[in-house]
């Protein structure tokens, strides 16, 4: 059961990213005739006060947030991996670095 949780989480993240990246949604197009429309097949979460599709805006925001998160994690992971090597090991990190002593 424990090993299934990361796979389920990664699958859900992949599904969200796939929807956000592949659906041809217009997040900024206004349709004033469709203001405050309730959820429908054309607009799964309805529309806002300018007639913009709420689902499209949510997908665009998700795509942007996940992109920033991936960059932040990559920067953090690279600095965490290489910073101890520069301080305690040779410049090319020829031997594994041990964690600092508490």
Image (cartoon, rainbow, N blue to C red):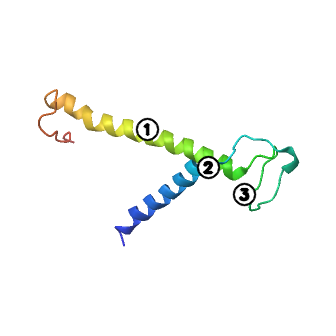
Residue 28 sits in quarter? top right
Residue 98: percent from left, percent from top: 16, 41
Q: What residue sits right under mark 3 in the picture? A: 45
Question: What residue would you read off at disc 1?
Answer: 72
Residue drawn 76% across and 56% down? 46
Which residue is the extreme one toward the top? 91
Which residue in the protein does label 2 denote? Answer: 59
Q: Nearer the viewer, residue 88 or 91?
A: 91
Left or right, 11 with respect to 49, comes to: left
N-terminal of the pair, mark 2 or mark 3, is: 3
Whichever of callouts 3 and 1 sits on the residue coming sooner in the sequence is: 3
Q: Position of residue 9 (x, y in %)?
A: 45, 60
User: Which residue is the extreme one toward the right?
Assistant: 33
Instruction: Identify the residue at image location x=56%, y=45%.
Output: 63
Which image quadrant: the C terminus? top left
Q: Quadrant of the N terminus?
A: bottom left
Asked if residue 37 lies left or right of residue 90, the reply is right
x%, y% of residue 18?
Answer: 53, 53
Tally of marks: 3
44 with respect to 23 (left or right): right
| Residue 93 vertical position relative to residue 45 in the rendered view, above or below | above
Q: Are marks 3 and 1 in contact (CB under 8 Å)?
A: no
Packing grade of label 1 (10 A; few <14, some 14-19, many >=20) is: few
Q: Residue at x 44, y 38 (%)?
A: 71
């Amino acid at each position: 059961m424990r090993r299934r949780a990361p796979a389920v989480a990664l699958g859900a993240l992949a599904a969200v990213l796939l929807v956000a990246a592949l659906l041809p949604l217009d997040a900024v197009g206004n349709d004033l005739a469709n203001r405050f429309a309730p959820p429908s097949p054309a607009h799964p979460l309805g529309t806002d006060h300018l007639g913009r599709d709420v689902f499209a805006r949510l997908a665009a925001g998700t795509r942007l947030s996940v992109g920033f998160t991936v960059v932040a994690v990559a920067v953090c992971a690279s600095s965490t991996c290489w910073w101890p090597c520069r301080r305690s090991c040779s410049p090319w990190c020829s031997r594994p670095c041990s964690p600092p002593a508490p």
